[in-house]
Amino acid sequence: MGVRDAKAYVGMTCEITWRDRMGNTHVTLATIEDARYVPLYGAYLITDVEDIRLDQIVAIEAADVALRRAA
């Protein structure tokens, strides 16, 4: 996923599935505040919970879609 793709989710509450450095999969429900390239660190998804590197993201789904799927 690139920064341009991630910018489509800015302002939305999403369910983000991502992997950490150890390869463990995490799911975070967060409001996406920005997506940007940070020099020396790479591309990041800035959320109200934590910042996630774009190359670690497995999937992003809007929260309303995820809730309907779970019901």
Image (spheres, helix red, strand yellow):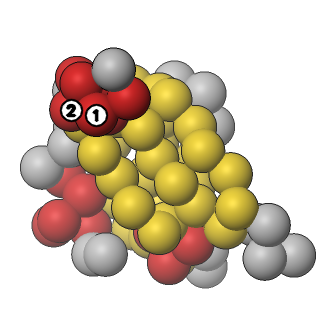
Query: Mark 2 is on which residue type?
Result: Val
Secondary structure of the residue carrying numbered label 2: helix
Q: Nearer the viewer, residue 9 or 26?
A: 26
Between 1 and 41, the one lying in front of the other is 1
Residue 50, located in which quarter of the rendered image? top right
Picture coordinates of residue 45, whole percent (x, y): 44, 52
Q: Whole-percent x and y of residue 40?
A: 61, 79
Instruction: Tell me if mark 2 has few (under 14), some (14-19) or many (20+) residues whose alpha carbon lies within 10 angstroms of its own.
Output: few
Q: Which mark is residue 1?
A: none
Q: Is residue 46 above or below residue 24?
A: above
Residue tagged by mark 1?
Answer: 69
Q: Secondary structure at mark 1?
A: helix
How far across and down, in percent of the image, does residue 67 sit? 32, 23
| Residue contact at pointers 1 and 2, CB within 8 angstroms | yes
64 and 2: which is toward the camera: 64
Residue drawn at (50%, 29%), measured in percent from left and top? 29
- Name which residue lies at 58% across and 61% down: 18
**Amino acid tagged 1:** Arg
Residue density around tag 1, few if under 14, some if 14–19, many if 20 or more, within 10 Å = few
Q: Residue 69: percent from the left, percent from the top?
A: 28, 34
Identify which residue is drawn at 68% across, 51% down: 26
In what quadrant of the picture does the C terminus appear? Answer: top left
Q: Is residue 32 visible?
A: no
Left or right of residue 61: residue 17? right
In the displayed image of the protein, which residue is found farthest to the front?
Answer: 71
